[in-house]
Image (cartoon, rainbow, N blue to C red):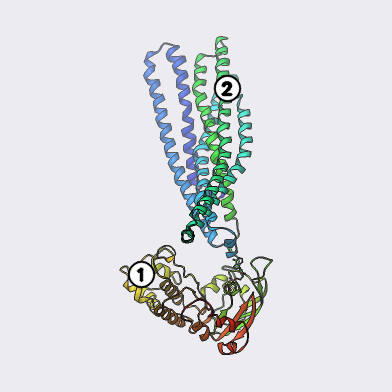
Amino acid sequence: MLARLRHHRGRAALVVLLGVVGTALVLVLPAVARHFTDVVIGEKRPDLVLPTALVGLAAIAARQTLLALRSLTAQALESRLVHELRVEMFDRLQRQPIRWFDRNRSGEIMSRVSTDVPNVQKLLTEALDVALPAALQFLVVLAAMFWQDWRLALVTIAPLPVIGLVTWRHSKVAEPQWRESGEATAELHALLHDSLSGIRQIKAYTGEPESLDRFADASRETRTKYMRVMRGQSLIWPGVSILAEAGIIAMVAFGSWRVLQGEMDAGILFYFLFAWGFLFEPISKINPLSQTLNRGTASAKRVSEILDRPPESHLTEGKRPTALRGEIRFERVGFSYDPESPAVADISLQAQPGETIALVGPTGAGKSTLLHLIARFYEPDSGRILLDGHPLSDLSKEWLRDHLGYVTQESFLFNATLRDNLLLARPDASDTEIRAALDAANALGFVEELPEGLDTLAGERGTRFSGGERQRLSIARALLRNPPILLLDEATSALDNRTEKLVQQALERLRADRTSFVIAHRLSTIEAADRILVLKDGHLVQSGTHAELIAQDGLYQRLHRGGFSQAPGT
Ligand code: ADP
């Protein structure tokens, strides 16, 4: 944060300057009190009552004006810093490799942006707006007290070292407790996110009571962790107050004694009584401050865990060949998500430019994994994949993905307008091009029937559209990109015959003239493929055309007899 603050040196300096001047003005009030005692009363000068009071009032007004300006400037600075932090964090999140998203739950990640970033903001607010002025005020008043009477000043601050020690010890304990509390909150968020995503399943299986139990447990855990911190917080402040208030008694007693001895004017004692308030005002802020600081530090650590993570490697660096034919070769490729069980092993295959390769096999056979490896969501553990003879590992991932169309099974749509959903594939596409892509995907008809056309919002995850419509929209998205290589995970969801035909037609147009890898569930797709690869337990067990494979006594024949998957129309 300090490094970031450097970019806004001017504003930060202004905050400090306004703080210093505003704070220095606190000294006027004790001086006014002393003046009333020693001069106005002591020398019996009623004519000075009004002018002295006016000086006091002017000082109060000037001080509050300066402090208000400081607060405004500080707020503007902080909100800018937090905005920068949030955007940088989002950028860093997006650039993490898929593997990282496999390991971290979305709800937990969201909590870092939604809870931890505001905590860091509070840390900044308090640091700039409370701690800094408080420290300044403390030092200024202390110096003035020593200037007035160093003996009395020493007595006044006698409890301070003990207060310092107590709060320091306390913050050592509190910070890890805040961290645990933050983790529990993140856990709660993760659970909430998970439950909302799965709400249809929960309802369908009447899982509400169990779901509630899980949530209540997590919420209780959050409460326990929070209370553990708060217990310490509630005890520390009375402790500090006892020490501080004992100081004022000692000060008054010692001061009165010195006045009686004739060593000091009564005015100085009044000066000290006023100044004491200003000296201990900053200390009264230690409690809420230490709370925010401890919580903020814990959150800042969680935030930097993300900011300090190196982004996905090879995103922009790497070769960017000028032409692409679309020949893909796997050479003895092996990969596992976790070391114990390989997802695919010893896969060798070759796809000529423009060929359609159908991948078939039972679930868990490793079909999606092959697509993930081509898109470089993951890197092979052994062997290599070549594109037009270039090892994929030499290419820039960005370049590679720019040349890929990836149509996933769930046909995800963002909760944005249809136009924006399609523009993801090619941000500079015109409405005419979008319409052409929709037309080729057999989607133009239903889009044009919508009252708002391309401006229709898709709803969360595209729920506004039916499965068949979503499929065609995601095909249109891929067509718009017009990629030389296509990765297609055919949807298994059941469609009525007419929609099924429309989708099939759209897919044929999409596959034409591209090297396509299709996880195929429908006989029509499989039969149309140039080559079929049959996978089982991560191994390539058969390969050939439909006619060749159906003639062999093997897995393909059995899958064929079973109808490949439950999809109708096969
Ligand atoms: P298919 O697409 O043929 O159904 P996958 O390629 O999805 O098969 O999965 C192959 C194997 O890898 C399976 O055993 C599956 O459980 C495992 N797997 C898939 N994705 C992950 C992941 N993100 N993390 C861990 N294991 C995974």
Would you say 323 lies left or right of 427 here? Answer: right
Residue 262 against residue 521 in the figure, above or below: above
**Front position among marks 1 and 2:** 1
Q: Residue at x 51, y 14 (%)?
A: 266
Residue at the outermost top position: 261
Give percent across and percent down for residue 235.
57, 31
Q: Amino acid at mark 2?
A: Gly
Q: Nearer the viewer, residue 142 or 189?
A: 189
Q: Secondary structure at mark 1?
A: helix
Front one among 146 and 208: 208
For the residue with label 2, is its CB less than 8 Å from the closest atom of ligand 1?
no
Task: Give the residue pinned by disc 1.
Answer: 454
Front residue (pair 455, 362):
362
Rendered location of residue 297, percent (x, y): 58, 45
Q: Any atom of ligand 1 within 8 Å of the CB at mark 1?
A: no
Query: Does any portion of residue 325 appear in the rendered image?
Result: no
Q: Residues within 10 Å of mark 1 (few under 14, many from 20)?
A: many
Tell me where residue 438 appears, x and y as whole percent.
Answer: 39, 76
Helix, strand or loop for disc 2: helix
Residue assigned mark 2 = 247
Q: Is residue 172 left or right of residue 10?
A: right
Task: Indicate the amino acid at tag 1.
Answer: Leu
Q: Residue at x 59, y 53 (%)?
A: 305
